[in-house]
Amino acid sequence: MTGIVETREPVTRERAVRVAIGRADANGIESLSMRKLAAELGVEAMSLYYHLRNKSDLLDAMLDAVYAEFDTPTREDQWRDAMSRRARSMRAVWARHSWALEIGARTSPGSATLRHLDAAIGCLRAAEFSMVMIGHALSVLDSYVRGFAQEEIGLPLDSSGGITPATEDIIAQQQRMAEDYPNLAAMAAELIMQPGYAYGNEFEFGLTVVLDGIASAHTAERRSGS
C-alpha cells in the first residue's frame, strides 16, 4: 500500500510575513519571536534567516504589508474625497493590526509604504498644493488618524463602540464624583451614558474639522500666490 505523502507549503518571505502578522493580530506583537514563528511554519529557526535577515527585517516587512492595505489615492482623485477614504482605511487597518501602531516609529519604510506616501503626495500635488502645504496636510491628517486609532484601541469599548464600561464607576459613585469631578460627571450623564453614544462616531467629526482646516489653508495659500 502506497503511503500518502503530505505536502507542506514552502516557506517564503511572503508566507513568513503573513503568518507573523496573523500571530501578532491574535496574540500581540510581544508574542512574536523568530523561534516561535519558525515553529509555526514548521521549520528550524535558522531556516528563517534565508528569507529574513533578523527580527527587525521581519517587523519592517510586516509594517510594509500593513501599509499595502491602506486605500491609496491617485492623481485623478479629488483630493478631499481621496484623503477621507485614506483616513478611514488607515483607521480600519490599524484596528485590525493594532500592533503596527507600536512598531511604526522603529522601522524603515518598505516599498509599499513608500508607494503609498508617494501616491498621497501626488494626489495633493495634482490639486495644486504646494510642497510646504502637502507637508502640513499629511502631518496633521496622519497625526489625527494615528492618535484617534491609538485612543480607540486603548479605551474599554463595548461591542457597540460605546465606553459605558469606563463610566460605570462614575455612575456607581455619582454623588462623590459630582462633587469632586463635576465636569466629568456631567459629561458621563449628558453624553457618554446616553443611548446610542459611541466614541467611534467622534472620528468623522474630527476628520471633517481637519479636512476643513486643510482646505481653508490651501485656498488661502493659492489666493496669496505663495
Image (tube, helix red, strand yellow):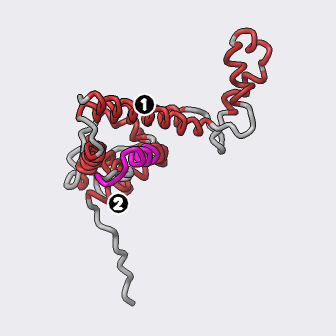
Verify whether residue 79 appears in magenta: yes
* Residue 166 horizontal/vertical position (percent): 66, 29
Q: In terms of depth relative to the viewer, which is nearer, 222 or 15?
A: 222
Name which residue lies at 37% across and 88% down. 2
Name which residue lies at 39% across and 41% down. 100
In terms of secondary structure, where does tag 2 sit? Answer: loop
Q: CA distance from mark 1 to mark 2?
A: 52 Å
Q: Quadrant of residue 215?
A: top left
Verify whether residue 187 appears in magenta: no
Tally of marks: 2
- The residue tagged 2 is 42
Which amino acid is tagged 2? Answer: Gly
Which amino acid is tagged 1? Answer: Gly
* Residue 35 horizontal/vertical position (percent): 33, 47
Q: Secondary structure of the magenta portion, mostly?
A: helix
Badge 2: how crowded within 10 Å, few (<14), some, or many (20+)? some
Name which residue lies at 77% across and 12% down. 176
The magenta stretch is 75-89
Q: In terms of depth relative to the viewer, which is nearer, 114 or 203?
A: 203
- The residue tagged 1 is 213
- Residue 37 in view here: no
In the drawing, does residue 218 fall left or right of residue 212? Answer: left
Badge 1: how crowded within 10 Å, few (<14), some, or many (20+)? some
* Residue 150 horizontal/vertical position (percent): 47, 33
